[in-house]
Image: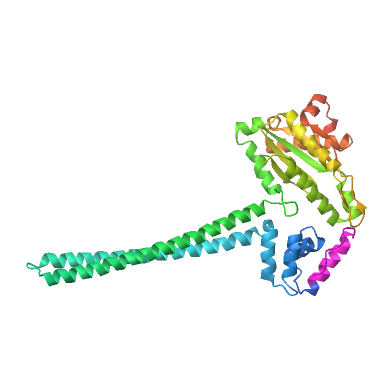
Amino acid sequence: MQAAVAPGEPGDDLATTVAMTMRQMGVVGLPRNYEIFYEALSGSNPRLSLEVIELGNRPTQEQLDQLGRKYFAQNHNQSIVEQARNVIAQELEDIASLLRSERTHLERYGQILDQTSGGLNSREQISRELLQKVANAMSMATRSTIDHGQQVAETLHEKSAELESVKSKLEEYKRLADTDPLTLLWNRRAFDKEIADIYNSEKGILFKALILADIDRFKAINDRYGHPVGDRILKTIADIFRTSVSESMFVARTGGEEFALIVDGISEQSTHEVADHIRLLIEQTRFGSSQAGAEYGPVTVSMGICMAAEGESADDLYAKADRALYRSKLDGRNRVTCHSELTARGGKSWMLYRKE
């Protein structure tokens, strides 16, 4: 596989390189294959790049699909679920067969006991030799039943472990399906579930808040330096979000250059301080390439805050935080605005905004 495209190369050149590389390696031009090679050749995911190289010059579709399921699980949900369903169905059938076998074995053991008991009751005189034969037969039948039961128990234990493995894989795939592959933050799918949960309890409504953030003039950055540079900037900003908040805060990438934080248990003033701290860290971060001697910054973000108690629903909370965010845009960018400030202003002109 060819080396990753240099940061300064336009997106069209990268697309051409991806198409040529796939053709040279005999890879079918499926969208899911293009996704893998675009990510690998852009250099934004070094681990994926290494795994694609390890596949050799003629990877099979199954090998590529395995990479797709690993790095882009959100696009392979149906096949993952179908595969797990087949495995679980087979395991359940095997367990049912074992239980039927155990039932049959126990029924035979019961028949032996009944026949032996009946034979003893029908004899008026019982010799020592007869009792010895009966004892031997019973001992063998009992030992056989115990051995069979142990085998069934061991097999059931193995099946249980296999089902537990499937469960773990499904949980891992679910986590991957809720993860943004570029930044490794939660994605929009996970965010939608998290923000909806706020209004499932009075505690969530009273103590939670939403922070929305949008990178200023990000389209201009992509247009000037190319998408690989834009991807690296997104990853750096995601790392700043991740390392600047407590583990209890939910951080997601909700769109191309948009991020969201759901905070819990702090006041509006404290929420503003958290947001402004992140904003300042991003403003002070150097975005560039020492090897290429290029500077891509400064990069800034605009942010909007709305307390959950100000929203009537998840959609309303998001809309109000979004309005506060774009008030920050209109006021000059690189700032934090609370929705309560908009309410205090009393005007309606702020409600009519246009995205960059």
Q: Count of labels shown?
A: 0
The quarter of the displayed image where residue 243 is located: top right
Say which residue appears at 78% left-offset and 60% top-offset.
39
69 up-or-down from 287: above or below? below
The quarter of the displayed image where residue 32 is located: bottom right
**Residue range highlighted in magenta:** 1-22
Where residue 145 appears, as percent x and y from the top left, is 31, 66
Q: Can residue 323 be spotted in the picture?
A: no
The quarter of the displayed image where residue 325 is located: top right
81 sits left or right of 263 in the view: left
**Quarter that holds the C terminus:** top right
Between residue 46 and residue 318, name the one nearer to us: 46
Residue 21 in the magenta stretch? The answer is yes
Say which residue appears at 25% left-offset and 64% top-offset.
110
241 up-or-down from 14: above or below? above
Q: Can residue 184 be spotted in the picture?
A: yes
81 sits left or right of 155 in the view: right
Between residue 198 and residue 59, name the one nearer to us: 59
9 sits left or right of 25 in the view: right
**Quarter that holds the N terminus:** bottom right
Residue 127 in the magenta stretch? The answer is no
Where residue 276 appears, as percent x and y from the top left, is 80, 35
Where residue 199 appears, as percent x and y from the top left, is 63, 35
Where residue 305 appears, as percent x and y from the top left, is 76, 34
